[in-house]
Amino acid sequence: QAALDLLNAACIDSTCREAISNHCLDWLHEIVKGDEVKRQGQAAVILAKLESIPQAKTDDAQGSGREQVIDEDETNIVHTLKGMLLSEDKSNWYNAVEGLAYASIQPKIKEELSKDSTFLTKLLQHPDETALNSAAAFGSLTLIDNMTRYPPTLSEEQKRMTQLKEYANAAKRPTETDPLDDDEHVAQRCNTLLRAGVVPFLISLHRSFSSKKASQASLGLIAGILLSLSKPTASRGIIAQQGGIPLLLQIFRQISSGPESHSVRRTTGHALARILISVDPKLAFGSRSPTSATPILLSLLTDDDADVSQGPRDLLPIFEGLLALTNIVSDPSLDTGAEVVRSSFEKIEGLLLSNNTLIQRATTELVCNLMTCPEGAEKFADGSKAAARRLHILVALTDVED
């Protein structure tokens, strides 16, 4: 057992992973085939870590025969881990979840797990204190995040830079996008998980954090999962109906204010914006006022603090934030337009002159909807020079081809 603990910890280092792969694989496989459940689970986790990280596979393992052995090993490991998860013995739950979280990095494993309804039902059972500790909760969120995460959208410049890096590193073969990880397959997996009840699971899991301070990483994973689930327009009403909006509002309040949490705040706001684009605010918030969501949406309009060395800034959160605000302020009875004008009109006004056509168009739609409140109309009709300038810009935009 001590040796397994040592190997499990050593997997964090690439050199150690290579040594374990060269000297310990047969022994680990023998343990997985054995009868001791605890050791079997930990050995399966170690093997899952080795198989999920490309560096662990040496160049001489690239032949078709060796690749087939590796595929069979991965299948056997996943089968073992799923069996541990589905068993009535909950003592090995953490090992099963951790191992599957690593294994699900592979697209084919994601696809296999998403098509196993029995597995999904067991995974998405509402957590309780005896079955799911904080470590297993994080593993469950990581597993779901792996299955629902969309591949990053790269600009042409970023694609060229990636190709140059691959050519510069002659020791590695150019990476190819797995067809099981394209948008269509990810959307199918998201829909499967949504129908299986992943949103109530996330709400229940988040509620279990209420007695203790939730980690920022766990909050970020929940927000990221909801962002992926809400990408298909047809899914947004289901997420809102199942309580996704209150969950995101609670998460945003729990996120720390430091710069290290900026990406989590932005992801949470982006997920909220996507949902609010496609649902009636009155139905989404019920008797509550949507003003609680307004500051979060407005925060998306600021600079995302992107590192210029990592490529151009992501304008999608800004665009979808503008669309969500347009939807919210379209109903004068909700009294959200006045708040938007008072707190962020200068920011919105600046986006009217954006170089991006879609941002410019969405901002113009928002400004037009803000005219339903007196504060918005005053910005263009109070007789001041600033009002005349704004009106001149708005009239000029009507002649822009988009």
Image (cartoon, rainbow, N blue to C red):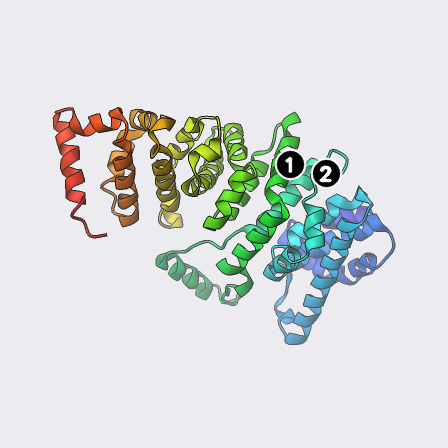
Q: Secondary structure at mark 2?
A: loop
Instruction: Give the quadrant of residue 162.
Output: bottom left
Q: Where 196 falls versus 131 (above or below)?
A: below
In the depicted view, which residue is nearer to us: 19 or 388?
388
The residue at the point 60 percent across, 49 percent down is 195
76 displayed left or right of 149:
right
The residue at the point 38 percent across, 39 percent down is 324
**Residue sitting at the far right:** 35
In the depicted view, which residue is nearer to us: 9 or 38?
38
Tell me, yes or no, whether the two marked residues, 1 and 2, touch with CB atoms within 8 Å: yes
115 displayed left or right of 284:
right
Q: Position of residue 341 (x, y in %)?
A: 29, 27
Q: Position of residue 58 (x, y in %)?
A: 63, 65
User: Crowding near pointer 1: few (<14 within 10 Å), some, many (20+)?
Assistant: many
Which label is found at residue 312? none
Q: The residue under label 1 is which amino acid type?
A: Leu
Instruction: Give the quadrant of residue 213.
Output: top right
Q: Position of residue 229 (x, y in %)?
A: 52, 47
The residue at the point 26 percent across, 49 percent down is 357
Q: The residue under label 2 is which amino acid type?
A: Leu
Q: From the image, tell me which residue sits under label 1.
A: 205
Q: From the image, tell me which residue sits under label 2.
A: 132
56 displayed left or right of 32:
left
Q: Secondary structure at mark 1?
A: helix
User: Crowding near pointer 2: few (<14 within 10 Å), some, many (20+)?
Assistant: many
* Eye-nearest disc, 1 or 2: 1
Asked if residue 287 can be seen in this view, the reply is yes
In the depicted view, which residue is nearer to us: 197 or 39?
197
Asked if residue 227 can be seen in this view, the reply is no
Q: Position of residue 400 (x, y in %)?
A: 18, 49
Q: Where 258 falls versus 275 (above or below)?
A: above
